[in-house]
Image (cartoon, rainbow, N blue to C red):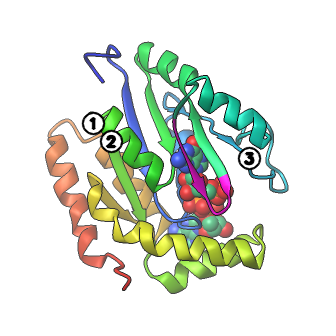
Amino acid sequence: MQERWSSGRLIVLTGPSGVGKGTLLKALMKRHPELYLSISATTRAPRPGEVDGQHYFFLSRAEFQALIEQGELLEWAEFAGNCYGTPRRPVEAAVQEGKWVILEIELEGARQIRHTFPEALRIFVLPPSMHELEHRLRGRGQDSEEAIARRLERARAEINAADEFDVQVVNDDLSVALERIERILFPAADEPAETAIALNEIALNEKVKTP
Ligand code: ADP
Ligand code: 5GP
């Protein structure tokens, strides 16, 4: 990344639907407005309160397919019946300006980024338990029963791949998880980045493994 795209940095945040990625990122962006959060394209319908161009670019299947064919997506994947992808140009422009760009994407997209940008820092967010994940998905109250079932099924596969990521963060207490992410991104001056990551790996012990 440094060599290819000047001093910017790419950060990938992945974790099962409902684990709290959006909540964590909202808090992180509030505390660090200098970070650049990539806005994805999706064929999913907007949820109540979601704004086109702010939460996602909401596209038809045909529009999404055209972006793929034009090579305009940095990565893309299907998730629970819809397509999601990262528009290439805004991310490239931000990194070229030296910004730290965050991609909040699912597992397949994160794997693509691992191949295309091995320098990217990849963080996986884990739930404290599957029970709590289901509770959060339902509590959000924005997905149908069918969508919840598909998301839980996908969650098991994603959680089992958590080891592929550079660091894992358990989102049990929100402020603790936020602090861990901050320490990974912004280690204290007297604390090497490796130490911050090692500290964070304590979370591995609490990791939720599914059969
Ligand atoms: P994601 O973006 O990963 O799909 P959300 O950020 O939408 O998940 O969070 C799903 C639900 O879980 C929301 O209702 C949110 O308020 C709640 N939530 C997020 N983090 C926590 C936490 N640490 N403890 C309890 N509830 C949480
Ligand atoms: P949701 O429908 O809950 O907003 O998102 C469903 C899943 O799609 C989440 O795991 C989210 O991280 C992922 N996602 C959002 N944008 C992208 C993207 O641009 N690319 C990929 N691969 N996944 C994405």
Mark 1 against mark 3, which lies toward the viewer?
Answer: 3
Which type of secondary structure does the marked residue at label 3 adopt? loop
* 200 in relation to 183, above or below: below
Q: Tell me if residue 79 is in the magenta stretch.
A: yes
Residue at the spot 83% in from the left edge and 51% down from the top edge: 49
Residue sitting nearer the eye, 113 or 119:
113
Q: Which residue: 75% across, 79% down?
A: 145
Q: State yes or no: discs 1 and 2 in contact (Cβ < 8 Å).
A: yes
- Asked whether the beta carbons under mark 1 and mark 3 sit within 8 Å of each other, the answer is no
Q: Residue 27 or 8: which is nearer the viewer?
A: 8
Q: Which mark is residue 43?
A: 3
Residue under numbered circle 1: 118
Q: Residue at x 50, y 71 (%)?
A: 155
- Camera-side residue: 158 or 126? 158
**Quadrant placement of the N terminus:** top left
- Mark 2 beta carbon near ligand 2 (under 8 Å): no
Left or right: 52, with 131 as reference point: right
Q: Which residues are magenta?
A: 75-82
According to the image, label 2 marks what residue? 114
